[in-house]
Image (tube, coloured by chain):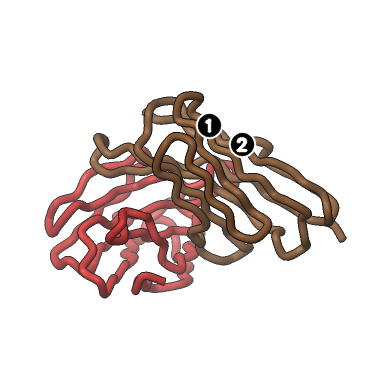
């Protein structure tokens, strides 16, 4: 599993509330990613990081922010959650041979 | 932006039959990945294809890559029920900041 954990695994929240999802890795990988998965869309990149404090936007970054203050943690924040952000969120890292590996996922429901 | 298309999106096949899933992508790429996802689970890496003509096989699954045609295939031989899952291809583009792009997935159901 490449030492990736995500927390929480499930969350239900209300529209307008802030939400932070955490991705934690134990193997010092440089690249980390946040994806969302929705039916009919596959996986879409939200944000990614290529080092501590180095992040960039993906194709669906609106409404999301990220932070990476330590190599092992990559945080995804929904500043004001909306129903359209109901989704399954996956964190990924690049292994030493560059293959992406995924965390277990977080199922987020925004009511 | 790199586009990745998979077809078919849904595939229902009988046990013992053969079939192929196709993955087309729009621009040159360094490498291509195949993943399997079971319902409610994360993505499991199946194959990494690194160069033109690369072929990888594991059990009843075989993946190949034609970089000139920008096409990868995932061939299923003599399908069994345990292969029922959603299969994704993903394509790397190193000069986009190490991003990788996914197809929409192929939902495979193997019927006994």
Query: Color used for chain B?
Result: brown
Nearer-N-terminus badge (2/1): 2
Residue closer to the observer: B72 or B104? B72
| Image x and y of residue B89, in percent | 52, 44
| Image x and y of residue B85, in percent | 66, 57
Q: Residue at x 51, y 24 (%)?
A: B69
- Disc number at residue B71? 1
Local crowd at mark 2 within 10 Å, few (<14), some, or many (≥20)?
A: some
Asked whether residue A88 is in view, the answer is yes
Residue closer to the observer: A38 or A63? A38
Local crowd at mark 1 within 10 Å, few (<14), some, or many (≥20)?
A: some
Asked whether residue A109 is in view, the answer is no
- Specify whether B62 is left or right of A58: right
Residue closer to the observer: A92 or A74? A92
- Are the residues tagged 2 and 1 within 8 Å (C-beta)? yes
- For the residues marked 2 and 1, what is the alpha-carbon distance in whole angstroms? 7 Å
| Image x and y of residue A79, in percent | 29, 55
| Image x and y of residue B43, in percent | 50, 60
- Specify whether A63 is left or right of B44: left
Q: Residue at x 38, y 28 (%)?
A: B28
The N terminus of chain B lies in quadrant:
top left
In the rendered image, the vertical position of residue A2 relative to residue A94, given as above or below = below
**Are both tags, 2 and 1, on one chain?**
yes
- Specify whether A71 is left or right of A34: left
Residue closer to the observer: A10 or A3? A3
Q: Place residue A13 in its image quadrant.
A: bottom left
Q: Place residue A60 in its image quadrant.
A: top left
Q: State which chain disc 2 sits on.
A: B
Report helix, strand or loop for mark 2.
strand
- Disc number at residue B22? 2
Q: Which chain is red?
A: A
Q: State which chain disc 1 sits on.
A: B
């Amino acid at each position: 599993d490449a030492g990736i954990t995500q927390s929480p695994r499930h969350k239900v929240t209300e529209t307008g509330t802030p939400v932070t999802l955490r991705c934690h890795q134990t193997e010092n990988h440089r690249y980390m990613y946040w994806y969302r998965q929705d039916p009919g869309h596959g996986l879409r990149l939200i944000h990614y990081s290529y080092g501590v404090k180095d992040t960039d936007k993906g194709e669906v970054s609106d409404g999301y922010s990220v932070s990476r203050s330590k190599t092992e943690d990559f945080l995804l924040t929904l500043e004001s959650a909306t129903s359209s952000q109901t989704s399954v969120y996956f964190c990924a890292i690049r292994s030493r041979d560059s293959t992406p590996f995924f965390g277990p996922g977080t199922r987020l429901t925004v009511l | 932006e790199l586009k990745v298309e998979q077809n078919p999106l849904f595939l229902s096949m009988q046990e013992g039959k053969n079939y192929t899933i196709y993955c087309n992508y729009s621009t040159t790429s360094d490498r291509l990945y195949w993943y399997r996802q079971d319902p409610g689970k994360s993505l499991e890496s199946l194959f990494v294809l690194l160069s033109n003509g690369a072929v990888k096989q594991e059990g009843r699954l075989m993946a190949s890559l034609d970089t000139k045609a920008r096409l990868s295939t995932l061939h299923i031989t003599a399908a069994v029920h345990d292969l029922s899952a959603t299969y994704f291809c993903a394509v790397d583009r190193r000069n986009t900041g190490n991003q990788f792009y996914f197809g929409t997935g192929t939902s495979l159901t193997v019927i006994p």
